Amino acid sequence: MQQSRPAPTDSAQQEERFLYAGYHSIISGVDRHWDYGGFPLPDGGFWRYREPNAVVVVEGNRLRVAAVPLTRFHNEVQILDNAKNMFFSTRRFTMPDEGTILFEWEMRARGINTRPRDLYDGFVSAHLLDFSTGMAFDFFVSNDTIATVYALLPFPGVPAPPDPEPERAVKPKYFCDFNELPLETAPWQWHRYGISYCKARDEVRFFLDGQEVGRYSEVPCKVDGCILALGLMTEKSIEDGRSVSLHGQGLIGEWGPFTITVRGNGEDGEKARP
């Protein structure tokens, strides 16, 4: 069990911090912290994000997954074509009504025969996903590019958000903002990532190696909770009823444990910096 729950500090701070990993359970099946992700299909089946020949290695609190080459694709549903191998956390993390929650972790990526400077040809990912609203806060990492992702997505089976009259709507109903960062990275280079969310202020913030690299206010849905997801992915639009996401490339990703810090009791969100 990869969790510890120290008592909060003093009443002015109201901080709780714990770890989430449990990657051994992917292999053992005991006290599962992670399952293969996926979504139900219209015909009653289920699409599982599982590369059949992926090699999964767990070293302590670190998870490494290699799929070389990638093979999974879907010719009709974009969200099923994108993720090739993905694990969902079995725990859903509750967002505090006041204060902030901060998720921090280390991650690195290596693309094999992926196209240079084309993030969407193959990347390693980490996600905060809310299947009750469709909100997603993510980091995508390739050999040479890192992007934050802020999205409201039509996940299969998730109720659609309220749809205002077109004449009154000032923002799209669904969206996905891939913010490619002007920062240098290299294949298999470790970085420390962080995503914080403040429900009371409808604000999400992204951190890389201790520095804020993105912030969005006016998050359109109140996120009451989220799961974590770890992926090997592409992001290429289906063309003429056919997936074009694969050309023999492969991906290797590695993730460390997640540190989750909850700061409540009205603590200023500015203090959520890693």
Image: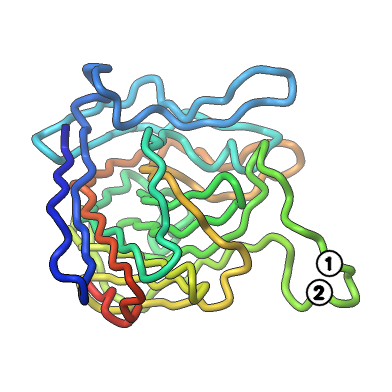
Residue at position x 22%, y 32% in the image: 23
Assign the N terminus to one quadrant of the image.
top left
Determine the residue located farthest toward the left in the rendered image: 60
From the image, tell me which residue sits under label 2. 169
Position of 37 compared to 213: left or right? right
State if disc 2 and disc 1 touch (CB < 8 Å). Answer: yes
Q: Nearer the viewer, residue 147 or 263?
A: 263
Residue at position x 38%, y 47% in the image: 93
Q: CA distance from mark 1 to mark 2?
A: 6 Å
Q: Which amino acid type corresponds to the residue marked 2 in the rendered image?
A: Ala
Determine the residue located farthest toward the front in the rendered image: 11
- Tell me where residue 15 appears, x and y as whole percent: 21, 65
Kindly state the secondary structure of the residue where label 2 is placed. Answer: loop
Q: Is residue 123 visible?
A: no
- Tell me where residue 126 appears, x and y as whole percent: 36, 51
Q: Which mark is on residue 77? A: none
Compared to residue 212, the image places residue 127 above or below, namely: above
Q: Nearer the viewer, residue 252 or 103?
A: 103
Compared to residue 226, the image places residue 263 above or below, namely: below
Position of 244 compared to 53: left or right? right
Q: Which mark is on residue 164? A: 1
